[in-house]
Amino acid sequence: MQQVADPFSANAITHENLQSLVQDGRVHSRAYTNQAIFDLEIDRIFHRSWIYVGHESEVPKPGDYQARPIGRTPVILVRGKDNKVRVLVNRCRHRGAQVVETESGNTRMFRCWYHGWTYELTGALAEVTEKGGYGPDFKSENMGLVEVPRVASHRGFVFASIKADGESLAEFLGGAAAQFDMLVDASPTGEIFLDAGSNKTEYLGNWKLVGMDGYHPNFVHASVVAGWARNSESGIGAMHREDPFSDEALTLTRDYGNGHAMLDFRAQRLKSYKKHAEFLSKVPGGVKYVEDMHKAYGQERAELLISLSGDPHLGVFPNLQLIGNQVRIITPIAPGMTQVTMSMVRLGGVSDEINTMRVRQHESFYGPAGSGSPDDAEIFERVQRGMMAEVNPWIEISRGMHREFVDTDGSVVGRITDEVPQRGQMKYWLHLMTQAA
């Protein structure tokens, strides 16, 4: 019997094959499970798009660094002695060893432990051991650590692109850019700091499963939602006096294009502003915080910002989410393995008690022993196992297609349980995956 070639093997994927994976309201499971498709994602998405690398507050002093990946490319986010933040490829120019092995730290220079080459914080080659072994054509000025071709920031969030040309960061973010303000401007001084610690989780599932999904909380997190209702006079519960994940709620889903999506809680949480402000008045520094916010932003905007508590619930394709009190980085490792790093946010210009309360709230839901994140990881793994089935291997993302509409800002809008974010994400995913080299 003649064996039929796999159309999704490493050397067989075509434009037409990729197009067939995403149809109106449904996606083929192979988009989440196939190794060759995953490899293509790394090349065409993570190695060509703007990728979030880190926040400027994570490298506050000269010599501070964070080591992170862009797809399969290890990079270093570092602040130089000139106070400039750079993104360097974490690879010695001699024989390719990484010059940084720890995830973060502070250093005067980078040293390769293989043969001792050292580099300045700018990436410039500082010293070559036994330099006499190289001839007159060896030029030290040409052998520094490679800078990632494009680096840009928005409100302190640093993005980098391995691709040397393409749209600007502002063009890429589009309408999603304004939603960063919902987090940063939760501080009366417009400052946030990612220095309150972080936690990581790995789950056996695809990276695209970490989406903006307003349909699942009443089921995956049913006990948590019930607890919020019982304790609606305090903390985050003060913003959940009515079910925010019901189609009757004012909560919406938004697709801003380019794969960026949002669960829009603004109108829903604004309804509970007075109750939330009343709760804050009982927290040390809470009264002053409310006063300072009104002085900084005016009454109308201050009430919105206070109501949201710095939670735009925004997903920036492909690897950044601003959710709750955290900045979340999504790192694809394999088709069925993903790492998620959650860094807690400290607000500038507020009392220690307010920031401590925010950290405790983060831990209670998103921490390793929290009531929410472990449930998400478990459900993602169940989804991944189920998608291995080859019998009718399509998954549905059609919810709300008949009732979505385009808002005045150009975003596509649906109700909170609608799969507007999933459709927007996969539409842009397909666009990037079918672009020629």
Image: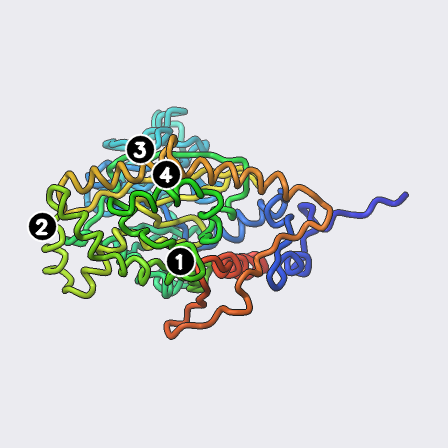
Q: Which of marks 1 and 3 is nearer the N terminus?
A: 3
Q: Distance between the residues labelled 1 and 3?
A: 30 Å
Could you tell me residue 120's position as x and y percent?
A: 27, 37
Left or right, residue 413 beside residue 228? right
Amino acid residing under circle 2: Lys
Give the residue at mark 3.
Answer: 104
Give the residue at mark 2.
Answer: 288
Residue 417 visible to the viewer? yes
Please tell me whether mark 4 sits on a helix, a strand or a loop: helix
Could you tell me residue 260's position as x and y percent?
A: 43, 58
Give the residue at mark 4.
Answer: 366
Q: 286 and 25: which one is in front?
A: 286
Give the residue at mark 1.
Answer: 262
Q: 65 and 376: which one is in front?
A: 376
Q: Distance between the residues labelled 2 and 3?
A: 35 Å
Instruction: Please tell me which residue is depicted at 23% across the width and 36% down the height of the picture.
Output: 63
Amino acid residing under circle 3: Ser
Give the colour scheme shown. rainbow
Could you tell me residue 296's position as x and y percent?
A: 12, 60
Q: In which quarter of the image is residue 247?
A: bottom left
Q: How far apart are marks 1 and 2 (CA)?
A: 30 Å
